[in-house]
Amino acid sequence: MDREKVLDTLNALLELELAGVVRYTHYSFMVFGPNRIPIVHWLRGQARESLTHAEQVGEHITTLGGHPSLKVTNLLETHKHSVQDILRESVEHERAQLDLYRQLLQLVQNESISLEDFARRMIAEEETHIAEVEKMLRTPQ
C-alpha cells in the first residue's frame, strides 16, 4: 500500500467532508418558503453527517501516522439558493466525494481490510445519498 497516496486521498476527503459541513449549514440558512422547516432539518442532518465522516477520515489519517489537514476544499458561492439549485450543487459535491472514496478503495484494496471496508461503506452511503437527492430533483409526472 502506498501510504503517502492513501494519506493524500484521505486528506482530500477530509477537506471535502469539512466543506460539506460548511456548505450544508450555509444552505440551511438560505431556504425560504412554506417547506422551509423539513428542508432545513434535512440540510442540517447532512451537515452533521459530513462532520461524522470527517471525524472518521481524520481518525484513519492519524492511525496511519499522518497529519489531518486543516484546509477546507474551496467553496464556490453561486448565489443560487432555490431548493433545486441547492440540490444540484449537493449532487456535484457528493459525486466529488464518491470519486475520492472510489480512489481510496483502489489504493487500499487487498492491502488494508479496515480501510477497504471503510471505503466500501462510504461509497455505498454516497451512492445512496446521490440517488436520494436525484429523486428529490425529479418532477412528479
Image (tube, helix red, strand yellow):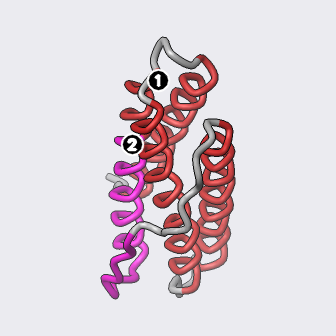
Q: Label for residue 1?
A: none
Residue 80 vs residue 114: left or right? Answer: left
- Report the span colored magenta: 74-100
Percent across and percent down for residue 14 are 53, 55
Q: What residue type is labelled 1?
A: Val
Residue 109 in the image: above or below residue 99: above
Q: Mark 1 points at which residue?
A: 108
Residue 139 visible in the shown view: no
Q: Name the residue under label 2.
A: 100
Q: Does the magenta stretch include residue 75?
A: yes
Q: Which amino acid does label 2 sit on?
A: Leu
Tell me which corner region of the image, top left, top right, bottom left or bottom right, holds residue 87. Answer: bottom left
Q: Is mark 1 on a helix, strand or loop?
A: helix
Q: Does the magenta stretch include residue 73?
A: no
**Are the residues at dot 1 and dot 2 in contact (C-beta closer than 8 Å)?**
no
Tell me which corner region of the image, top left, top right, bottom left or bottom right, holds residue 91. Answer: bottom left
The residue depicted at 39 percent of the width and 58 percent of the height is 93
Residue 41 visible in the shown view: yes
Mark toward the start of the polypeptide (1 vs 2): 2
Depth-wise, is mark 1 or mark 2 nearer the camera?
1
The residue depicted at 63 percent of the width and 50 percent of the height is 58
The residue depicted at 60 percent of the width and 46 percent of the height is 57
Main SS, magenta residues: helix
Residue 99 in the image: above or below residue 12: above
Is 36 in front, or is 115? 115
